[in-house]
Amino acid sequence: MKLRSHRITPVSHEEYAPHTDFPAVEESPEVTSEIASGGRFSPLNFALGLRVPDCTFHPAEARDGAQPLWFYGRDDRSWACFFLREGENAKVWQHGPRRLWDEVRAAHTWWCAQGRPQWPRFGLTVGAAGQYAWLDEPGRPL
């Protein structure tokens, strides 16, 4: 459990995406609802957190067969919205200096290429020189 001093300040959506003129929509057929369906504490979302640093993920409530997933850059005002609707390719909007969805998609591709690792394959090493997460063995830092 995190201490109060370790908790991240919640993101204000209006501070990130206050305008109504969204950038051009992209389609993302290769990524499924796997990111949304895993839950906040899934191994996939853990891997995404390691591979896409300084990014906060907020799945919005699913309604009428649709669900937006929001990604916010913590060190700038970049954001991405991944919009899932049953029976359709996902739609993506991105804005800001970081291409957050591109980073998330690359992290998802990496996770799939590693065989969709589950919790037992992840580890953490902490020592005098610092700390780092790894996959399968300490010689494979993330």
Image: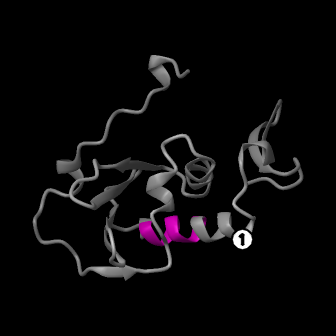
Q: Position of residue 43 (x, y in %)?
A: 63, 48
Quarter where residue 83 is shown = bottom left
Q: Is residue 135 above or below residue 105?
A: above
Q: Is residue 1 left or right of residue 10?
A: right
Q: Is residue 92 above or below residue 24?
A: above
Q: Is residue 29 left or right of residue 69?
A: right
Quarter where residue 96 is shown = bottom left
Magenta-drawn segment: 101-107
Q: Main secondary structure of the magenta part?
A: helix
Residue 117, visible in the rendered structure:
yes
User: Mark 1 Cα within 10 Å, few/some/many (few <14, many 20+)?
Assistant: few
Residue at (85, 51) in percent of width and height = 136
Residue 40 colored in magenta in the image: no
Q: Split into 4 quadrants, where in the image is the C terminus?
A: bottom right
Q: Is residue 4 left or right of residue 59?
A: right
Q: Split into 4 quadrants, where in the image is the N terminus?
A: top right
- Which residue is under mark 1? 113
Residue 104 colored in magenta in the image: yes
Q: Is residue 35 left or right of residue 67?
A: right
Residue at (18, 72) in percent of width and height = 22
Residue 74, visible in the rendered structure:
no
Q: How many marks?
A: 1
Q: Circle 1 sits in a helix, a strand or a loop, which is it?
A: helix
Q: Is residue 113 above or below residue 75?
A: below
Quarter where residue 85 is shown = bottom left
Colour mode of the rendering:
one colour
Q: Position of residue 95 (x, y in %)?
A: 30, 68
Dot 1 amino acid type:
Ala
Q: Position of residue 26 (x, y in %)?
A: 33, 81
Q: Nearer the viewer, residue 65 or 78?
A: 65
Q: Nearer the viewer, residue 37 or 126?
A: 37
Residue at (83, 31) in percent of width and height = 127
